[in-house]
Image: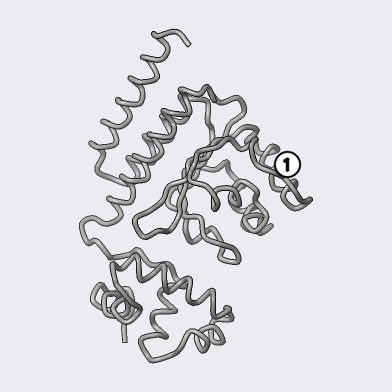
């Protein structure tokens, strides 16, 4: 690649990082990320946590820039359980193109074929490890996006800064308020009255391991060292009440 082209990619990366640092709202980060990705030919994007199935994706989405109708169809068809892109994300910390995934089953092929029908013909995903140990990602797609190696380096850095900025904004100014999902709140609510994971699973129609997973996520979000402290922090921040 010509030096001028490389310099242009570097400039775009530095400009994007500087702009993210100045943005003070979640909607501002979303708009800026959409603008940057569109300049690379991407028409769809998602910033989300990447839970292990059978946990569902929708409660972990931070920014949704998918095409109209795709999220509803994805959720209704329970595509997350079979999505080969999500499956690879859960096993790697390296960015990858969607074309690198192994489509090993008819269900996985249906996910990719349907995404293609929604205009998401080529995609790129950046895995992100959060401080809690829980994995997240920025994934993007379009008809003919720029997937030059230097472009992907820019997208890697931009994705990390966008995720970091949205994570920081979600903690401001009341750091812990509003971070729990409905299920996480229910589990802590029942924990507060002395129910075990097994008992909570019976009440909410979840397996014990799923309850433990949700409780672990809530504990990390609330900066707690154990479930008891998580309950205390949730009560103090009015996420739950007794």
The image shows residue 90, relative to residue 46, as above or below, that is below
Foreground residue among 212 and 172:
212
* Residue at the limit of the structure toward the right, as seen here: 106
Image quadrant containing the C terminus: bottom left
In this picture, residue 27 sits left or right of residue 44: left
Q: Position of residue 198 (x, y in %)?
A: 52, 87
Q: Position of residue 229 (x, y in %)?
A: 28, 78
- Helix, strand or loop status at disc 1: helix
In this picture, residue 163 sits left or right of residue 82: left
Residue for badge 1: 113
State the residue at coordinates (20%, 57%).
173
Q: Position of residue 84 (x, y in %)?
A: 65, 48
In this picture, residue 242 sits left or right of residue 3: left
The image shows residue 12, relative to residue 182, as above or below, that is above
Q: How many tags in the picture? A: 1
How did the renderer colour the structure? one colour
The image shows residue 11, relative to residue 55, as above or below, that is above
Which quadrant of the structure image shows residue 241? Answer: bottom left
The image shows residue 124, relative to residue 58, as above or below, that is above
* Residue at the limit of the structure toward the left, as seen here: 173
State the residue at coordinates (32%, 79%).
231
* Residue at the limit of the structure toward the bottom, as seen here: 194
Foreground residue among 203 and 4:
4
State the residue at coordinates (30%, 25%).
15
Q: Position of residue 202 (x, y in %)?
A: 56, 87
Question: Pointer 1: residues within 10 angstroms few (<14), some, or many (20+)?
Answer: few
């Amino acid at each position: 690649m010509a030096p001028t082209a490389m310099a242009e990619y570097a400039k775009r990366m530095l400009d994007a990082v500087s702009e993210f640092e100045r943005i003070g709202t979640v909607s501002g980060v979303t708009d800026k990320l959409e603008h940057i990705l569109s300049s690379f030919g991407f028409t769809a994007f998602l910033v989300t946590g990447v839970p292990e199935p059978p946990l569902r994706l929708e409660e972990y989405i931070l920014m949704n820039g998918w095409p109209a109708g795709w999220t509803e169809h994805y959720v209704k068809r329970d595509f997350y359980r079979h999505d080969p892109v999500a499956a690879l994300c859960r096993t790697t910390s390296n960015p990858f193109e969607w074309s690198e995934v192994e489509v090993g089953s008819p269900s996985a092929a249906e996910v990719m074929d349907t995404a293609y029908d929604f205009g998401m013909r080529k995609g790129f995903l950046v895995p992100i490890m959060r401080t809690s140990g829980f994995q997240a990602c920025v994934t993007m797609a379009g008809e003919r996006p720029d997937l030059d190696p230097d472009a992907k380096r820019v997208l890697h850095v931009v994705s990390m800064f966008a995720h970091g900025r949205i994570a920081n904004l979600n903690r401001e100014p009341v750091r812990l308020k509003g971070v729990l999902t409905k299920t996480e709140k229910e589990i802590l609510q029942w924990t507060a009255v002395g129910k075990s994971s097994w008992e909570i699973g019976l009440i909410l129609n979840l397996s014990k391991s799923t309850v433990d997973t949700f409780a672990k996520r809530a504990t990390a979000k609330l900066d707690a060292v154990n479930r008891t402290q998580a309950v205390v922090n949730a009560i103090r921040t009015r996420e739950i009440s007794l």
